[in-house]
Image (cartoon, helix red, strand yellow):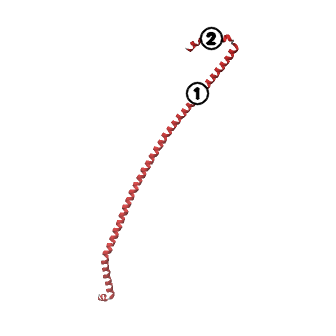
Amino acid sequence: MSEFLKSPETWVAAAFLIFAAFLAWKAFGPMMKSLDARAARIKAELDEAQRLRDEAQHLLAEYKRKQRDAVKEAEAQMRAAEEDAGRQRTRAEADLAASLKRREQQALDRIAQAESEALAEVRTLAVDLAVGATRKLLAESVDQGKAAALVDDAIKNLPQKLH
């Protein structure tokens, strides 16, 4: 063992071990503090990432709910629009039917009026022809004395005809 202690390599190895132990003793604290700080920073980043993930999930759920609500509202608006269109279509059909009926009645009234006017015109023409024919017939067949007697008779019966 004495030769072991006399060997310079032994003392170099011992000095190296002492230096390494001293270095480890002095460097162990700051290195541990650095590792603890790094672990704390990583934990904080993980906590922040978890918080952001939770917030993102909350926002996603909220937007999905809003989307479902918007879809329901859009469907309700579509149903309301379809119902309104149906009511308007029904009202338009009723208005059209009433308008057609009114126009048909107006056309029938115009036809009846035209028939009445034509009938009156035919009657007037027939009366004019009858009066003309009667005048001509009377002028040809009745003499002056008989004509005077007919006029006197018509004047005498006039008060009875007027009442």
Q: Quadrant of the N terminus?
A: bottom left
Please determine whether, in this image, residue 18 is positioned above or below residue 80. Answer: below
Q: Say whether disc 2 or disc 1 marks the residue closer to the N-terminus.
A: 1
- Residue in front for this viewpoint, 131 or 39: 131
Q: Quadrant of residue 145?
A: top right
Residue at image location 65% in from the left, 21% down from the top: 128
Identity of the residue drawn at 31% across and 82% down: 19
Q: Position of residue 79 (x, y in %)?
A: 46, 44
Looking at the rendered image, the disc whose residue lies closer to the viewer, 2 or 1, is: 2
Query: Neighbour class for label 2 at 10 Å: few (<14), some, many (≥20)?
Result: few
- Residue 157 appears at what percent x and percent y? 59, 11
Q: Quadrant location of the C terminus?
A: top right
The residue where tag 2 is placed is 152
Question: As drawn, which residue projects farthest toward the left?
Answer: 2
**Label of residue 113 in the image:** 1
Residue 47, above or below 70: below
Q: Is residue 55 above or below residue 76?
A: below
Residue 148 screen position, x and y as percent: 65, 11
Q: Quadrant of residue 16?
A: bottom left
Q: Residue at x 33, y 88 (%)?
A: 8
The residue at the point 49 percent across, 38 percent down is: 91
